[in-house]
Image: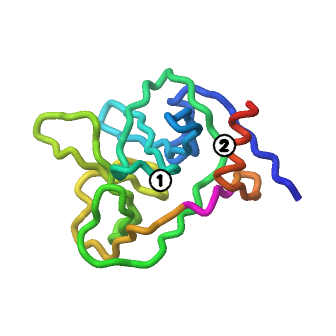
Amino acid sequence: MTETIKVVSRPAFAARAGAVLIIQGEDGPAVCMKVERRGLDFVRHYLVPLDPRPADGAGLTYLDPEDEVMTCAGQFRFVLGEAAGGSPGVGDVFTNSRGTFLKVAEHERFEGRKPLAYADLMTGEVRSRQEKAVKAVYPGWWIDGVVLDHDGKATLQQIREAAAGS
């Protein structure tokens, strides 16, 4: 059975944290995760390119809340692969007692804050200071598609094709 992949355009603020986004990259459509940083009186919206994986690791790219983004209703299916020791590098996935995170570089620089952040793969929230008590590092992680909200599954290529047809 062929799954119906629904890709819709909406403002960035309307896409949930952890959402599947499709953007037009330099080399064609790129699949990204929308992540959010919540403060006391603000929410900042970002995307993290996941496929193709950036050569320099992963980084947060700011999204204006009013920018239109292409979204696919579903959840990424991450495969962690083999665990490695040591500290995670930018672009590595790791686990600690609080969850599973992707270490990303921040493109925005704020005085007094390190240029690193951690995207929670389950919630899509951006967190800081997650490298204490790292249990395992997964430098060879990959995405085995997207579990669609209506119980189907799609490959990243199918999502790119659906976005191109929208």
Q: Is residue 166 above or below residue 84?
A: above
Which is more N-terminal, label 1 or label 2?
Answer: 1
Image quadrant for the N terminus? bottom right
Q: Which residue is mark 2?
A: 160
Q: Is residue 75 left or right of residue 158?
A: left
Residue shown at 46%/49% (left/top)? 124
Residue shown at 41%/48% (left/top)? 54
The segment highlighted magenta reads: 143-147
Element assignment for label 2:
helix
Q: Amino acid at mark 1?
A: Thr
Q: Is residue 62 left or right of residue 151?
A: left
Within 10 Å of disc 1 (Cα), the crowding (few <14, some 14-19, many 20+) is some
Residue shown at 46%/25% (left/top)? 65
Q: Whole-percent x and y of residue 118?
A: 33, 53
**Main SS of residues in magenta:** strand
Image quadrant for the C terminus? top right
Q: Whole-percent x and y of residue 27?
A: 53, 38
Q: Is residue 149 left or right of residue 83?
A: right
Within 10 Å of disc 2 (Cα), the crowding (few <14, some 14-19, many 20+) is many
Residue furthest right in the image: 1
Q: Which residue is mark 1?
A: 123
